[in-house]
Image (cartoon, rainbow, N blue to C red):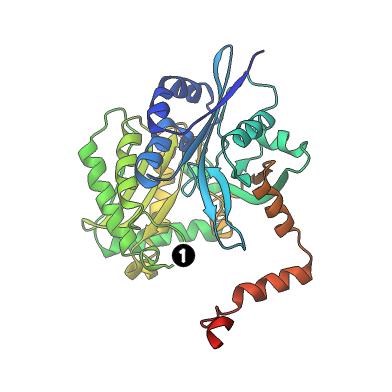
C-alpha cells in the first residue's frame, strides 16, 4: 500500500488538516483528549506561539493514517546545543501516543525518522508518557538504537455503577477520612460543587467564570508561589488555559470543577475529557485551608458526579503516584521512547551521554570553571 510521510510546520497547513484530523480522532477512541485538534491548535497558536511545531502526517490510500504532533525544543545545558523533538501536547497530558488509525499495521517509526531527517538537523525525538498499549511502544522495542524506558504508571480510578460500591473498595481508614473531611468542611460554611465542560449545552460565560475562579485558587495555592513545575496561573499559561478551556467545552471535552465555600472558590480540578473517560491534569486548593483539606472532599464529589454521569474511569496522571494510590490501586504503565536521528548532533549527543566517568568529571569541571576576565595578551 503506497504510504506518504510529510511534515506540516505552518499554522495554515495545520488548519487544512482539521477535517481529516477530527475524523481520525473519532476513529481512535483510545487516543488521549490531549491529542485532539483543538488542544494542539491552542498549544500552537497561544502557549507555544513562535516555537516551531513539527506535525508528522502519515497518509495511505484511505487517507490520514497517523499523526504525531511534535514541538522543536532546544537544550543548552550541554557543551553543545541540542535540538530535540517532543510531543506538542506535553506539559499537561496524562498520556500521549499520537493518533494512529486502527487499520494501520505497518511500521511507523522508521518512515517518521526518515521524514524528520530530511526536514531538520535534530539530535533525536523523545516521546514521553506513551501508554503501554500504544503501537509505538511495541515497534520501538524491536528497533536498534531506540531506547524504551518505563517511567512509572498513570493512576486510573475505575468507576463502578455506584458511589457506595466505589467506597466499599477503599480501606476503612480512607472511607473514614473522606466522610470526616466532608463533614468538617460543611461546618465551615455553605459548600457548593460546580462542574462545566461536559454537557451538550455549553454556556461559555459560565466556563469563563469557573476558569477565573480556578485561577484565583491557583494563585492562592502552593503552586502559585512554587519555583518549579507548572501551574495554570503561571504567566505563560493563563491565556492558554482560558482559550483551550472554551474550545474544549464547546466539544464537551473540558472537565473543570470548582469547590466553593460561602461563595468563595477554595479548590479546583482541571482536565480534558473523552467520555466515558476523563482526566485530571491540574488541581489545587488555597493554602490557608490546608488543615481543612478541601481537595479530599472535592475529589470525592468529583468521583460521585462522574459515576452519576456514567463515566467509567478517571485518569489521574503519573506524578505523586503514592498519594494518588489512596484513591485507586490501578496503575497503567507509561514509557519514554528516545529515537536517535542519523545526524551529526545525534552522534555528538550519543557520545556525550555514553562518555566514561573520567570524561564526565572533566566536562563538569570545565563547565564550572569561571570565565577569565583578562586574556594573556592583555598582560603583555
Residue 242 image-quadrant placement: top left
The residue closer to the viewer here, 206 or 18, is 18
Residue 203: percent from the left, percent from the top? 23, 35
Residue 96 image-quadrant placement: top right
Q: Using the image, determine if residue 230 lies above or below residue 248.
A: below
The residue closer to the viewer here, 364 or 70, is 364
Q: Is residue 343 left or right of residue 325?
A: right
Residue 57: percent from the left, percent from the top? 54, 27
Residue 187: percent from the left, percent from the top? 29, 63
The residue closer to the viewer here, 233 or 84, is 84
Q: Quadrant of the N terminus?
A: top right
Specify whether residue 110 is in view.
Answer: yes
Q: Please name the residue that numbered disc 1 is placed on.
A: 228
Specify whether residue 331 is in view.
Answer: no
What residue is rendered at 40% in x and 46% in y?
A: 48
Mark 1 lies on a secondary structure that is loop
- Answer few, some or many: residues within 10 Å of disc 1's Cα (few below 14, many 20 plus, some between 14 and 19): few
Residue 298: percent from the left, percent from the top? 38, 53
Residue 143 image-quadrant placement: top right
Q: Using the image, determine if residue 155 lies above or below residue 131.
A: below
The residue closer to the viewer here, 130 or 41, is 41
- Counting every numbered tag in the picture gives 1
Q: Quadrant of the C terminus?
A: bottom right
Q: Is residue 321 left or right of residue 164?
A: right
Q: Identify the residue at the far bottom of this view.
A: 379
What residue is rendered at 40% in x and 61% in y?
A: 181
What residue is rendered at 39% in x and 58% in y?
A: 284
Q: Is residue 22 left or right of residue 96?
A: left
Amino acid at each position: 500500500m503506497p504510504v506518504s510521510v510529510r511534515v506540516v510546520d505552518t499554522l495554515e497547513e495545520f488548519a487544512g488538516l482539521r477535517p481529516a484530523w477530527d475524523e481520525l480522532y473519532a476513529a481512535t477512541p483510545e487516543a488521549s483528549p490531549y491529542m485532539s485538534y483543538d488542544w494542539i491548535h491552542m498549544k500552537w497558536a497561544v502557549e507555544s506561539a513562535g516555537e516551531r511545531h513539527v506535525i508528522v502526517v502519515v497518509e495511505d490510500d484511505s487517507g490520514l493514517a497517523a499523526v504525531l504532533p511534535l514541538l522543536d525544543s532546544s537544550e543548552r545545558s550541554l557543551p553543545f546545543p541540542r535540538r530535540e523533538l517532543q510531543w506538542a501536547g506535553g506539559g499537561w497530558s496524562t498520556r500521549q501516543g499520537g493518533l494512529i488509525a486502527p487499520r494501520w499495521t505497518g511500521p511507523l517509526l522508521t518512515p517518521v525518522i526518515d521524514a524528520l531527517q530530511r526536514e531538520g538537523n535534530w539530535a533525536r525525538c523523545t516521546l514521553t508518557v506513551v501508554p503501554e498499549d500504544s503501537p509505538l511502544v511495541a515497534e520501538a522495542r524491536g528497533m536498534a538504537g531506540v531506547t524504551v524506558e518505563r517511567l512509572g504508571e498513570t493512576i486510573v480510578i475505575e468507576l463502578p455503577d455506584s458511589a457506595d460500591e466505589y467506597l466499599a473498595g477503599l480501606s476503612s481508614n480512607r472511607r473514614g477520612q473522606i466522610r470526616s473531611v466532608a463533614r468538617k468542611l460543611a461546618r465551615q460554611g455553605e459548600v457548593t460543587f460546580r462542574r462545566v465542560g461536559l454537557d451538550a449545552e455549553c454556556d461559555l460565560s459560565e466556563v469563563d467564570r469557573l476558569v477565573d475562579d480556578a485561577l484565583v485558587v491557583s494563585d492562592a495555592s502552593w503552586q502559585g508561589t512554587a519555583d518549579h513545575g507548572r501551574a495554570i496561573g503561571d504567566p505563560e499559561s493563563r491565556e492558554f488555559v482560558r482559550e483551550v478551556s472554551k474550545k474544549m467545552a464547546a466539544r464537551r471535552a473540558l472537565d473543570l470543577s470548582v469547590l466553593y465555600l460561602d461563595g468563595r472558590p477554595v479548590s479546583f480540578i482541571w482536565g480534558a475529557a473523552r467520555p466515558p473517560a476523563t482526566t485530571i491534569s491540574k488541581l489545587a486548593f488555597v493554602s490557608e485551608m490546608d488543615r481543612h483539606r478541601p481537595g479530599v472532599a472535592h475529589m470525592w464529589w468529583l468521583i460521585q458526579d462522574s459515576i452519576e454521569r456514567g463515566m467509567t474511569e478517571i485518569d489521574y496522571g503519573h506524578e505523586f503516584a503514592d498519594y494518588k494510590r489512596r484513591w485507586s490501586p490501578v496503575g497503567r504503565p507509561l514509557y519514554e521512547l528516545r529515537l536517535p536521528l542519523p545526524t551529526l548532533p545525534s552522534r555528538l549527543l550519543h557520545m556525550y551521554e555514553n562518555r566514561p566517568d573520567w570524561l564526565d568529571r572533566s566536562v563538569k569541571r570545565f563547565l564550572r570553571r569561571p570565565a577569565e576576565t583578562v586574556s594573556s595578551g592583555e598582560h603583555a
